[in-house]
Amino acid sequence: MNSLLATVNKILTYSVVDGPGNRLVIFLQGCNFNCPACHNPYTIGVCDHCGDCVAACHVDALEMVNSKIVFDAATCDQCDACLTACPISASPMVQRLSVSDILEIARKNKPFLNGITVSGGEATLQLKFVIALFTAVKADPDLNGLTCFVDTNGHLGAHSWERLLPVTDGVMLDIKAFDPALHHALTGQDNAKTLKAATIVHDAGKLYELRFLTIPDKTDTDAEVARLTDFARALGSNVRIKLNAFQHHGVRGEALKWHKMTESSVTKIATHLRKAGITEVVTPALYL
C-alpha cells in the first residue's frame, strides 16, 4: 500500500461542493485536457524540474537538489509566484502521498466527513492509486461508512471503468461540449470517450451528476443546449445536471477575454432543461 504514491496538488479536509455532504477532497496533479477555461490551471501539468520557479520564490522555499525541485512547505508563504512562473501550468508544491497517508488524514477528520472525493487535475490519470485508495477505504472498518466519489472529465476507456466502478460510489462527470470540433477547441481532446463514459457510469448506477460548463457564445448556444437536453433525456429524466457558469476566477490567457456567464443566461438554460423533463437541474449559488 505504501509503495504506491500519488502526486497530490492539495487536500481539502472539508468541502460541501465536491459531492454529497461534507467531504475530504484530494486534488491530484496532472490533466489530459488543456482547457483555457480551467479555474485550476496549475493542476494541468506535471513538474519537469526545469527550475524556472526557483528564482520566482522570494522566501527560498524552492531549491534545485540533484536536478530535482525540492519544496519546503514550512518556509513557503503561499504567494503562488512559482505557479505564475511555471511555463507548463504545473506546481512545484505537490506532495507524494501513499494510500496510508490519505487514510490517516481521513481518520483524523472522520467525525466531520460523509465521504472522500478524488479530483484534479484529472483523477483518473492516477487510476491505480484511486482504485487502491477506494479499495482500502471500503476494507477499513473505521472508514467504510464513507462514500468514495470521483470528479472526472470522463476521458477513460471502458475497460478502465470496469476496474474503477466496483469500488466507486459516485461519479461527477464533466462534459465540456457536445460538438466534437468545439470540444477539441476547448480541451485539446476528442469527446467520444467522455460521452461514452457518461452512459457507462449511468448504466452502472454510479452517475451522481453531469456537469456542464456554460460559456457565452460557445457552450450556451441553442445547438449545444439542445444536444445537452437530448443527451440527458436519453440517459433518463432523473439524471442530475449541474450547470456551471464560466467566470474569470483562476483562468489564464485567452479565456480572460471571454465574456462571463450571467445568472439570467444560466437560468434560461435551466428552465429549458426543466421544461424538457429533466427534474433535477442545479445552478450556481454565486456568480463572481
Image (cartoon, rainbow, N blue to C red):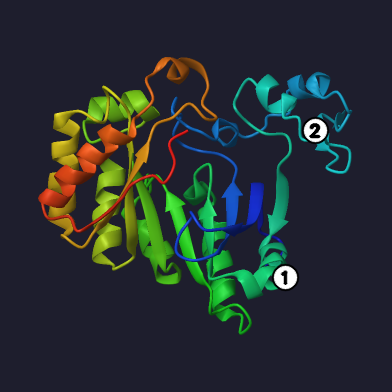
Label 1: element kind: helix
**Identity of the residue drawn at 67% across and 32% down:** 47
- What is the spatial separation of the Cα atoms under label 1 and label 2, in whole angstroms? 32 Å
Mark 1 and mark 2 lie on one chain; the one further toward the N terminus is 2
| Label ID, residue 142 | none
Q: Return the residue found at the far bottom.
A: 141
Residue 119 in view: yes
Q: Which residue is mark 1?
A: 108
* Residue at the spot 80% in from the left edge and 32% down from the top edge: 68
> How far from the left and from the top, in percent, is residue 35?
43, 29
- Residue 31 at what x, y percent from top left? 50, 38
Task: Write the residue at 40% across / 64% down.
Answer: 170
Where on the picture, by quarter, is residue 128?
A: bottom right
Report x, y in % for residue 143: 60, 77
What residue type is disc 1 on?
A: Lys
> Within the image, what quadrant is residue 23 found in?
bottom right
Amino acid type indicated by mark 2: Lys
Q: Is residue 214 above or below residue 13?
A: above
Q: Residue furthest front?
A: 264
Give the camera-side residue of 201 and 217.
217
Q: What residue did someone put label 2 on?
A: 68
Circle 1 packing at 10 Å, graded few (<14), some (14-19), many (20+), is few
Residue 107: percent from left, percent from top: 69, 73
Image quadrant containing the N terminus:
bottom right
Residue 191 in view (yes/no): no
Q: Answer with the quarter of the image where residue 166 lies.
A: bottom left
Q: Residues within 10 Å of mark 2 (few under 14, many from 20)?
A: some
